[in-house]
Image: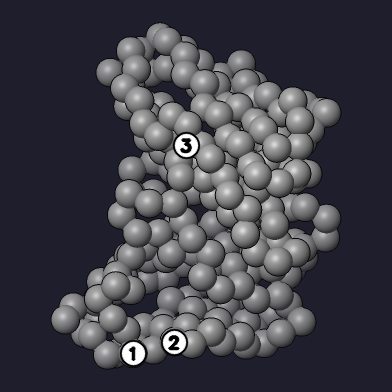
Amino acid sequence: SAVISQKPSRDICQRGTSLTIQCQVDSQVTMMFWYRQQPGQSLTLIATANQGSEATYESGFVIDKFPISRPNLTFSTLTVSNMSPEDSSIYLCSVDLRQSYGYTFGSGTRLTVV
Amino acid sequence: GENVEQHPSTLSVQEGDSAVIKCTYSDSASNYFPWYKQELGKRPQLIIDIRSNVGEKKDQRIAVTLNKTAKHFSLHITETQPEDSAVYFCAASPISGYSTLTFGKGTMLLVSP
């Protein structure tokens, strides 16, 4: 299965600031996905990142708040902008290897906004 | 869009018992159904998946069944062990091309020794 490296693993940020989360995959993948998991909740898709085109955002998520970059087939970043305490959550990147292994998740970034 | 319902939200069993978690989905185009196990503080891990051309799939103590007509699928864990304690998520997706997964709300399984 693919190895996905995500960083930072956790951070405590001041409200109003921004945090960029990085996701690196050890193989080339067409699509990368960014999820949010609020405490005790399920996984909610933020956006799908396709290399060479703008990310596709799900209802309730906007590019100004969660800008995404996908510069190549192995890397993506998610920025959480102008943070508020409500953004405190775990953010996970994921890739689709369903041809053999299905969706694989990064280790997650635990974000606390104070 | 797809909607996935998962039940129960919590499930407590004694070690050695069986556990069953059930999910229903709404989109008849969905044909890929994975199950994930998430231990506390860790990432979700794929434990088993099933595609719509198969009615049942087994892997040691875990099995998944699918009823496409009724749009429901279930996870079965036999001979449960304390290390099976975790949150389990079902999900559904169309398989054509690369499509996004829609997750259920999760089931917290507690296996008591």
Q: Residues within 10 Å of mark 3 (few under 14, many from 20)?
A: many
Instruction: Name the outermost residue toward the front.
Output: A26
Q: Which mark is residue B79?
A: 1
Q: Are marks 2 and 1 on the same chain?
A: yes
Mark 2 belongs to which amino acid?
Arg
Mark 3–mark 1 Cα distance, whole angstroms, equals: 33 Å
Q: Is residue A36 shown to the viewer in this render? A: no
Q: Residues within 10 Å of mark 1 (few under 14, many from 20)?
A: few
Where is residue A15 drawn, in percent x and y?
Answer: 35, 12
Mark 3 belongs to which amino acid?
Tyr
**Quarter of image, res A31:** top right
- Of labels 2 and 1, earlier in sequence is 2
Mark 2–mark 1 Cα distance, whole angstroms, equals: 7 Å
Q: Are marks 3 and 1 on the same chain?
A: no
Q: Are marks 2 and 1 in contact (CB under 8 Å)?
A: yes
Where is residue B53 drawn, in percent x and y?
Answer: 76, 82
Mark 2–mark 3 Cα distance, whole angstroms, equals: 31 Å
Where is residue A110 drawn, in percent x and y?
Answer: 37, 35
Mark 1 — on which chain does it sit?
A: B
- Disc 1 element: loop
Mark 3 — on which chain does it sit?
A: A
Residue drawn at the location 40% of the way across and 59% of the way down: B38
- Disc 3 element: strand
